[in-house]
Image (tube, helix red, strand yellow):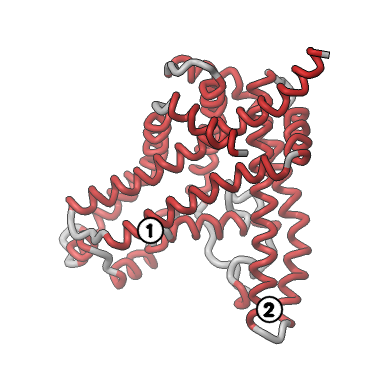
Amino acid sequence: MLHALAEGFRRLARSAGLVPLLLVVNLGSAALLAVPLARTLEKDLEHRDAARQMLHGFDFPWWSQWSDAQQGWTASFAPDVFGAGLAFKNLDLLLRGYLPAGLFVAREPRGAGAGATGDAGPGVDPVILAAGAAYLVLQTFLAGGVLATLRGSRGSWSVRGLLHGSGFYFGRFLRLVALVLAVDLVVFGLHAPLARWADHRAHEAVSETTALAWLLGRHALLLLVLLWVNMVSGYAKAIIVLEERSSAVLALLSAFSFALARPLRTFGHYVSLAALGAALLALWAVLDGAWETTGYATQLVALLLAQALMASRIALRLALWAGQLALYRRSTQAPRDAVAAA
């Protein structure tokens, strides 16, 4: 596991230019909705006293009235999209089946996202879900070129080579993503009766602590399984790139058996990088809370801090992929060398 961590960051440093490139792609994708939203806000705030309050902070009464009048995806502009709260909101949407593209929301029992109230809570506008689905396809396209770059032994790479690798592996990765989504669908389907049973036990619990344990426990179990599936899909991508597999099904099965035979090394490596991501989010939350945005200059600094967080998260994702490549290659190369020596 330590070798995978070290090798992952070493390969990341060797191809560090991938981070700003992918950050630009991320910003461009977000701008498809961010720019129209900014124009809408500018138009609705024009010649209003709330404009100054929104510039130097947040005018909740104006936002509440504005949000009630919105129809469609613009109504998603809310205080919970700022700061570290966005990560918790996305986690909630993931466990309720809204991510990605709202594919699994029908499988989630009513009341799963809102506790004892029985209210499933607000979902996600179809326009945002469609944008997220398009971004997933874009990520799938770029993943092949990124992994091919991280696989190489040379430090130099080019955008042309990245795009060539992306196009070469895109079909296989797209089939793999479809398979993984099907597995996630099965996971949500199996989780639904378990969730109903756990909710029933929580409602019958005589103490609030026990009820909370049942509710949090079933969400933790679902999150653990989803993380495991995501990790296995990462090794399936590594297998396709390292062994030039053409079958996404066989690559996924090989990745599952590989991870199952080495649970401590594979999942320990995955959880270690996830913990680093959580630590980065906590650090950014502290900085964001200590930094008061009161105008354009401070908003610019806040934007730079937010993009530094995104760049760090991209770097961790690349380090994860590079570490998985290294771990799989090292674990499978040793038996092959032994057989060849014999």
Q: Secondary structure at mark 1?
A: helix
Task: Identify which residue is drawn at 60% across, 48% down.
Answer: 271
Residues at discs 2 and 1 in contact (Cβ within 8 Å) = no
Q: Position of residue 165 (x, y in %)?
A: 54, 18
- Quarter assignment of residue 107: bottom right
Q: Residues within 10 Å of mark 1 (few under 14, many from 20)?
A: some
Report the amino acid beneath label 2: Thr
Q: Reply above or below: 55 against 39.
A: below
Q: CA distance from mark 2 to mark 1?
A: 30 Å
Task: Identify which residue is drawn at 42% across, 57% down.
Answer: 282
| Quadrant in the picture for the N terminus | top right
- Quarter assignment of residue 13: top left
Q: Residue furthest front?
A: 342
Q: Position of residue 289 (x, y in %)?
A: 32, 62
Q: Nearer the viewer, residue 328 or 29?
A: 328
Q: Reply above or below: 25 against 203.
A: above
* Tag 1 residue: 285
Say if residue 135 shows up in the picture: yes
Q: Secondary structure at mark 2?
A: helix
* Tag 2 residue: 210
Task: Identify which residue is drawn at 68% across, 18% down.
Answer: 244
Q: Nearer the viewer, residue 191 or 265?
A: 265
Q: Nearer the viewer, residue 147 or 264?
A: 264
Q: Nearer the viewer, residue 256 or 105?
A: 256
Task: Identify which residue is drawn at 47% across, 55% down.
Answer: 87
